[in-house]
Image (cartoon, helix red, strand yellow):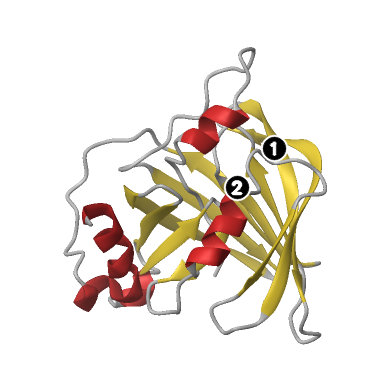
Amino acid sequence: MRLAVLSALGVLLASSASAGEEASLPFGEGSTVYWTLAYDGGSDRLIERALISGDDFMIFQTVGDTAVGDASDYFALYSGIDYRTCDETQATAEERAALAALWPLEPGKSAKITSYDDTALTVRVGEASAFFLMGQMWPAHQLTLDYESEEETDEELIVLDQLPISVSLKWDATSLDTVTLVTKPSPVALPDLSQETIGECAALLNEKTD
């Protein structure tokens, strides 16, 4: 599965926005994100709902026909970049700090982390670009996930500058996932957010109440 979106980085957002920038894409808890997943020979759609945010993460729920009914339906996004389903090992405090330090996005910045299966990788910020979404071009940067393992294919994603939102993920030459629609934040009935339901992500919510 692919990376998706993140909101509420607080100070990080403030530091990345300049006085002349237009308003950011409306996004937050209760927003729904629609993806088109294109691959060699076909395409699918994916719907994700933003549930609750923290200082450097947001927890989402996959909804619709692709949901399977266990902790893998939920995932955490760290700094809009690192995607981990809630049945997997989550990012460490050190990895989270390294990802947060990439903001504001600037070419040449990088962070070394490990994936959920302990594969080492380097996140590299590339050149500035733009992404068309909701009838407007949004300033963005291209990032590369450079895996050290030769068995893993490097991935490219596009992240918006004004919000830490991943809007595109290129897995390989024939697979491209793209955000096509983001709804405004709205009240949403939260599911049970206990460890029984959201697995490893429950520990993130404990941070918010400690």
Note whether residue 81 is visible.
no
> Is the N terminus in the top left, top right, bottom left or bottom right quadrant?
bottom right
> Is the C terminus in the top left, top right, bottom left or bottom right quadrant?
bottom left
Q: As shown in the figure, which amino acid type bears the numbered disc 2?
A: Val
Q: Position of residue 87 (x, y in %)?
A: 38, 79
Asked which secondary structure carries label 1, the reply is strand
Which residue is label 1 attached to? Answer: 140
Left-right relation of 105 to 52 = right
Q: As shown in the figure, which amino acid type bears the numbered disc 1?
A: Ala
Q: Position of residue 199 (x, y in %)?
A: 30, 76
* CB atoms of marks 1 and 2 within 8 Å: yes
Task: Pick whichever of labels 1 and 2 is earlier in the sequence.
Answer: 1
- Mark number, residue 167: 2
Q: Position of residue 64 (x, y in %)?
A: 34, 61
Asked which secondary structure carries label 2, the reply is strand
Q: Foreground: 114 or 182?
A: 114
Q: Foreground: 200 or 30?
A: 200
